[in-house]
Image (tube, grey):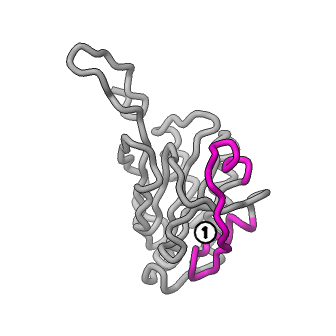
């Protein structure tokens, strides 16, 4: 798999998504990643540490530049726990759990997060503001309600299908209420 092409695809998709999502500084962005799917394999069977590192490193660079925090979701073998910076866990009062990811329990993205984050920890649950799912890993459980699907400019990274979610505040109040402009759909 071409590392440079993967980096270009990640950057193009993330630039597009972040422009559409209008995330605030301090927001949390969740990544679901199947490196197996990126290289054309079957999810959970053909994990690639190299691909995980390329994607996570580039995401951290892009998000950090905007003041957005990355949370990297693990696979079902660790109950979809997430790697975040310790500071994020403490600031958001997230319960830190004891597990160290491996290539086949947590996955390549989590191993890369442990390599590239300053002080990584695992947390069991999170309510992220938005996220990207590379390889159909099911990130919805970690994105706040109300979730808004965002169509990325590219639909694949490598061979993996890509989807994305943002969130917006719930509309409450009924017929007499008025609402601010939707910053995601801008309508």
Q: Residue 5's spot in the image, x, y percent?
A: 57, 67
| Image vertical order of residue 36 relative to residue 96, above or below | below
The residue at the far bottom in this view is: 45
Identity of the residue drawn at 64% across and 79% down = 102
* Residue under the point 45% across and 83% down: 41
Task: Judge left or right: residue 156 versus residue 73.
Answer: left
Count the labels in the image.
Answer: 1
Q: Secondary structure at mark 1?
A: helix
61 or 108: nearer the viewer: 108
Of 54 and 78, which appears nearest the observer?
78
Horizontal side of 57 relative to 184 (left or right) equals right
Q: Quadrant of residue 172?
A: top left
- Residue 107, magenta (yes or no): yes
Q: Which residue is mark 1?
A: 109
Can you say whether 25 is above or below 165 in the image? above
* Residue in the picture at 48% in, 81% down: 44
Residue 63 relative to residue 77: left or right: right
> Residue 183 magenta-drawn?
no
Q: Residue furthest right?
A: 118
Relative image position of residue 86 (x, y in whole percent): 73, 53
Closer to the camera in the image, 115 or 62: 115
Q: Locate the C terminus and report the quarter of the image it occupies.
A: top left
What percent of the width, then of the height, locates residue 60? 67, 54
Looking at the rendering, the stretch of residues picked out in magenta corresponds to 86-115
Give percent across and percent down for residue 111: 67, 72
Q: Which residue is located at x 49 percent, y 71 percent?
A: 158
Q: Residues within 10 Å of mark 1 (few under 14, many from 20)?
A: many
Which image quarter: residue 23?
Answer: top right
Instruction: Tell me if residue 67 comes above or below residue 114 in the rendering.
Output: above
């Amino acid at each position: 798999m071409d590392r440079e092409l993967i980096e270009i695809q990640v950057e193009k998709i993330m630039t597009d998504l972040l422009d559409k999502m209008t995330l605030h500084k301090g927001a949390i962005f969740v990544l679901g990643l199947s490196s197996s799917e990126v290289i054309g394999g079957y999810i959970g069977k053909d994990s690639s540490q190299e691909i995980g590192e390329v994607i996570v490193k580039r995401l951290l660079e892009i998000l950090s530049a905007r003041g957005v925090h990355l949370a990297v979701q693990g696979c079902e073998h660790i109950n979809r726990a997430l790697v975040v910076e310790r500071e994020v866990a403490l600031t958001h009062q997230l319960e830190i759990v004891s597990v160290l990811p491996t290539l086949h329990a947590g996955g390549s993205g989590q191993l890369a997060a442990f390599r590239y984050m300053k002080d990584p920890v695992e947390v069991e649950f999170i309510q992220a503001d938005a996220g990207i799912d590379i390889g159909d890993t099911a990130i919805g459980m970690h994105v706040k309600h109300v979730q808004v699907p965002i169509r990325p400019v590219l639909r694949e990274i490598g061979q993996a299908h890509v989807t994305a979610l943002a969130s917006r505040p719930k509309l409450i109040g009924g017929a007499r209420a008025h609402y601010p402009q939707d910053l995601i759909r801008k309508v």
